[in-house]
Amino acid sequence: MGSFSIWHWLIVILWLAAFMVPAWRITSRAGFSGALSLLLLVPLVNIIAIWVFAFVKWPHERAGA
């Protein structure tokens, strides 16, 4: 078992950025705190969070109605 190379960590960071940046923007535009997108990093909680975001009334919608 060797240690991970710099290429491994570079790929991990790029992979996380590919998911976290759009998720942060989506939650921000919906009226939630962008930090809620960090829930996508927690296994099983990410599935629950997606379902909650899909069916809860967004603050952005409440302000316009």
Image (cartoon, rainbow, N blue to C red):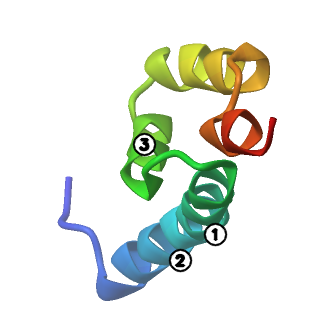
Q: Give the mark nearest the N terminus, 1 or 3.
A: 1
Numbered disc 3: secondary structure = helix
Label 1, residues with CA under 10 Å away: few <14, some 14-19, many ≥20: few
Near-viewer residue (15 or 65): 65
* Quadrant in the picture for the C terminus: top right
| Mark 1, residue position | 18
Q: Which mark is residue 5?
A: none
Q: Which residue is mark 2?
A: 14
Q: What amino acid is at disc 3?
A: Leu
- Numbered disc in front, either 2 or 3: 3
- Residue 36 placement: quadrant: top left
The answer to which quarter of the image holds residue 10 is: bottom left
Q: Which residue is mark 3?
A: 36
Residue depicted at 59% across the width and 49% down the height: 31
In depth, the one of 51 and 6 nearer the eye is: 51
Query: Which label sits in the foreground, 1 or 2?
Result: 1
